Amino acid sequence: MDATITVDDLAQAIKNSIQDGRSMEDEQAYLLAMHVLNFFGYSDRIIDNILEPEDRDAFYMLEDSGILTTEREETTLYDGREWRIHYWLFKRDRIGDLISLSAPEEAAEPGEESPYADLPEDVWRRG
């Protein structure tokens, strides 16, 4: 997945990531996707310390579903102390996989004609 992640795409990925028999309403998934994307904007990575605890809980949930992941960077400060910076990142390939779970399958391959294309419309009426 190379394009920008849209709210609709992320909402669909969130809905499709829920496995254990539960489901999420479309509106809830959309609101969560919008909330998350408000942090990321057009970036794939944000710094963790901008999150409030309730936001971080949602991010951990998305990490459990494979939509987000974390990384950390260590740097040495001027006084010699080590400083760790934690980041959240989109897992674009996982998001793409989750979105494709709901993509309708095409009836025929491009360039192939459907075997039903030449049948007259009245064939489909019940008699």
Image: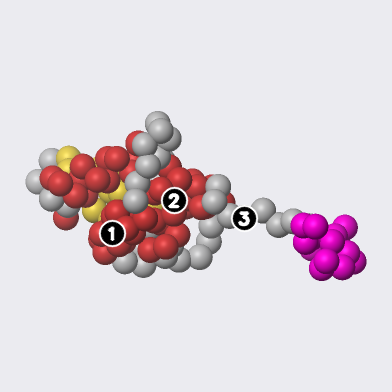
The numbered mark, 2 or 3, whose residue comes first in the sequence reads: 2
SS under mark 3: loop
Instruction: Name the residue carrying label 2.
Output: 13
Q: Is residue 35 left or right of residue 105?
A: left
The numbered mark, 2 or 1, whose residue comes first in the sequence reads: 2
Q: Which quarter of the image is occupied by the C terminus? A: bottom right
Q: Nearer the viewer, mark 2 or mark 3?
A: 3
Distance from disc 2 to disc 1, alpha carbons, whole Å, reads 13 Å
The numbered mark, 1 or 3, whose residue comes first in the sequence reads: 1
Q: Is residue 71 visible?
A: no
Q: What residue range appears in magenta? A: 109-127
Mark 1 surroundings: few (<14), some (14-19) or many (≥20) residues within 10 A = few
Query: Foreground residue, 53 or 99?
Result: 99
The residue at the point 30 percent across, 62 percent down is 34
Q: Which mark is residue 104?
A: 3
Q: Picture coordinates of residue 108 (x, y %)?
A: 78, 57
Q: Picture coordinates of residue 106 (x, y %)?
A: 71, 57
Q: Is residue 122 left or right of residue 35?
A: right
The residue at the point 87 percent across, 58 percent down is 115
SS under mark 2: helix
Badge 1 amino acid:
Leu
Q: Picture coordinates of residue 123 (x, y %)?
A: 84, 61
Badge 3 amino acid:
Pro
Which image quarter: residue 80?
Answer: top left
Which image quarter: residue 4?
Answer: bottom left
Badge 2 amino acid:
Ala
Q: Is residue 106 above or below residue 19?
A: below
Q: Residue furthest top?
A: 20
